[in-house]
Amino acid sequence: MRPVVSIITVCYNSECFIKKTISSVSCQKYPYIEYIIIDGGSEDSTAQIVDTFGNKVSKFISEPDNGIYDAMNKGIDLSTGEWVLFLNSGDTLHNPLVISDFVNYLNSSKEETVYLGLIQTTISGSKGKVVKPKTEISPWYTPPHQGTFFPLRLLKENKFNLSFNILGDRELYIRLMKTKNLTPTILPIIVANYDLGGISSDGTKSLKIFSEAKKIKKLYGGSGLIKAYCRAITKYLLSKIISSETLVRLRYS
């Protein structure tokens, strides 16, 4: 039997972005998709926009939450598919065949692990570099979750740690790799168009990000602390004189 793929989008006051994300899911050619949207109780027209898609959205809840990873955990609780992909509001699936291509690759692989797809970066609507994820396990690196397919069974047993406000996805990824002894597999497909405007791209937050990464290192080990701190402080100081968008363009254009 062909597997059901659960796609989870979390959002809050996302009326400017949610339509394109839902559209990219609803146009997928693969028929067995469960699409779940977790809204944090938006005060704009997000809920009304979601309603216009009818049964293209399998499950929708709108209520206050305790941050993005709490919302993502709610999505896990509601999921019933065999595989899960988290697609942020504002991000889109790269083309209508993404999920079909993933399932076809999955059928040839016959391996239960975490699958990491390529990412087409976007910056204010313009295309940047295509990024190939790394399989390394490190407190200083996270494969973009917009391109990561997780077995739902593992996520039901290992949810996001809410003590991490920014790097909950990194902590979960490393926890799965370490405790389940998994070796992630690179997918030879571009999965998502990833908007680089998120908090992890904001240079002013680089020291907070480093603090959480250091906490992950304490939990799971790893090297490169001094190098990571120097990189974080450099990014923070540059953010005082150059906009985060300019820094992102220099890196990914």
Image (cartoon, rainbow, N blue to C red):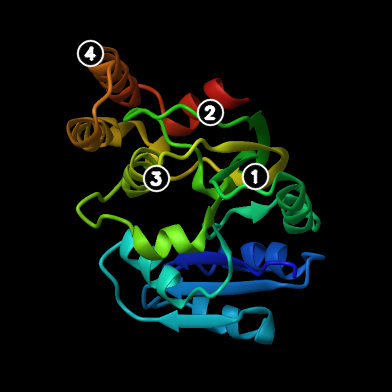
Give residue 243's position: percent from left, percent from top: 41, 30
Instruction: Tell me the distance, in whole angstroms, between the alpha carbons under discs 3 and 1.
Output: 38 Å
| Amino acid type indicated by mark 1 | Gly
Label 2 SS? loop
Image point 77% across, 72% down: which residue? 31
**Which residue was labeled with disc 4?**
226
**Image depth: mark 3 or mark 1 in front:** 3
The span from disc 4 to disc 3 (Cα, nearest Å) is 29 Å
| Comparing labels 4 and 1, the label whose residue is closer to the camera | 4
Q: Which residue is mark 3?
A: 180
Q: Secondary structure at mark 3?
A: loop
Distance between the alpha carbons at the discs numbered 3 and 2: 18 Å
User: Which circle marks residue 134 in the picture?
Assistant: 2
Quarter of the rendering occupied by the C terminus: top right
Label 3 crowd bin: few (<14), some (14–19), many (20+), radius 10 Å: few
Looking at numbered disc 4 in the image, what kind of residue is underneath it? Ile
- Is mark 2 in CB contact (under 8 Å) with mark 1? no
Residue 67 appears anywhere in the view = yes
Q: Are marks 4 and 3 in contact (CB under 8 Å)?
A: no
Could you say which quadrant of the image residue 238 lies in? top left
Q: Position of residue 137 (x, y in %)?
A: 40, 30
- Closest to the observer: 24 or 18? 24
Where residue 125 is drawn, which disc sits there? Answer: 1
> Mark 2 is on which residue type?
Lys
